[in-house]
Structures are given as C-alpha cells and as structure tokens.
Image (cartoon, rainbow, N blue to C red):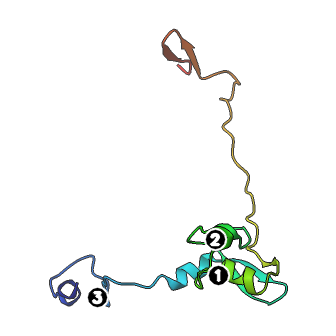
Amino acid sequence: MRRINASQITDPMRPPEGYSITIRHSMIAEVEYYRNHHWRCERCGNEVRRSMNRPPQEADCWRRAGAACRDNRCAWHMHLRFCGGQYIKVKEPEPKAKGKQERRQPDSAGKQCYKQEDDHIIDLTD
C-alpha cells in the first residue's frame, strides 16, 4: 500500500491530493449509524442500542446456555440476574415514506401486446 500511495507515476484516476489506501479501517461510526433502535431498562436505566427492531432478550446470549449462563460478558443474563427490569423502547428511526409505485399500463388501444400460442409467444404490436 505504501508503494501505491507514494507512487509518482502519472495516473489519470489519481485524486488531486493523492491516494490514501490503507489495509485497516474503523467501522465504529458506520456501526453506530445503523444502531438506531434504542431500548432503556425502566429500573436501572441501562440503555441498549440495536440495529434491529427487537428488545434485548435471552436469544442475545452468545453462549446459548439458557438460565444457567453465568458468563460476566453476557449482558442479557447479567442484567436479568442483577436488575430484572423490563426494557422499553425510547427511540426508533423515522418511518420511510412510501412512494407511489408505477404500474405498467397496456398500450394506448388497451389491447394485449403479446399472445401465447402453443410453446411460443407472438408479438401483436406489428
């Protein structure tokens, strides 16, 4: 990557400020952008942000150990053990406006443009 970034060879696609190609990048901002469903515990105030519209639940346990889960990294079972409160939704994304979907209209005379006979289709627009 260093060789490409430092190259002085004429390249019509090169941006004016030069290349800045890296092999590592951070996706933190992108992940936070998509985590737009916010849930808050009504007892302890713990906030959980999710990308999907479902409350925190037992299915979030990464070990799938059920009620016997004693892993300190399992947020769901830790919350259940020490607080036990219910999560309520406090924020969600704006609903998308549904646009009009265009439907294909038959030709101006209102007749079919194609007709199927046997195993082939005949074009009637001639």
Disc 2 residue crowd, few under 14, some 14–19, many 20+, Cα 10 Å: few
Quarter-wise, where is residue 68 in the image? bottom right
The numbered mark at residue 75 is 1
> How far from the left and from the top, in percent, is residue 103?
69, 40
Q: CA distance from mark 3 to mark 1?
A: 45 Å
> How far from the left and from the top, in percent, is residue 87?
80, 78
Q: Secondary structure at mark 3?
A: loop
State which tag comes first along the sequence, 2 or 1. 2
Q: Secondary structure at mark 1?
A: helix
Disc 3 residue crowd, few under 14, some 14–19, many 20+, Cα 10 Å: some
| Residue 79 appears in the rendering | yes
| Residue 51 appears in the rendering | no
State which tag comes first along the sequence, 3 or 1. 3
Tell me which residue sits at (68%, 77%) in the image. 76
> How far from the left and from the top, in percent, is residue 94?
75, 72
Left or right of 5? Residue 36 is right
The numbered mark at residue 18 is 3
Q: Secondary structure at mark 2?
A: helix
Q: Which residue is mark 2?
A: 60
Q: Amino acid at mark 3?
A: Gly
Left or right of 101? Residue 16 is left
Tell me which residue sits at (65%, 66%) in the image. 59
Marks 1 and 2: in contact by CB < 8 Å? yes
Disc 1 residue crowd, few under 14, some 14–19, many 20+, Cα 10 Å: some
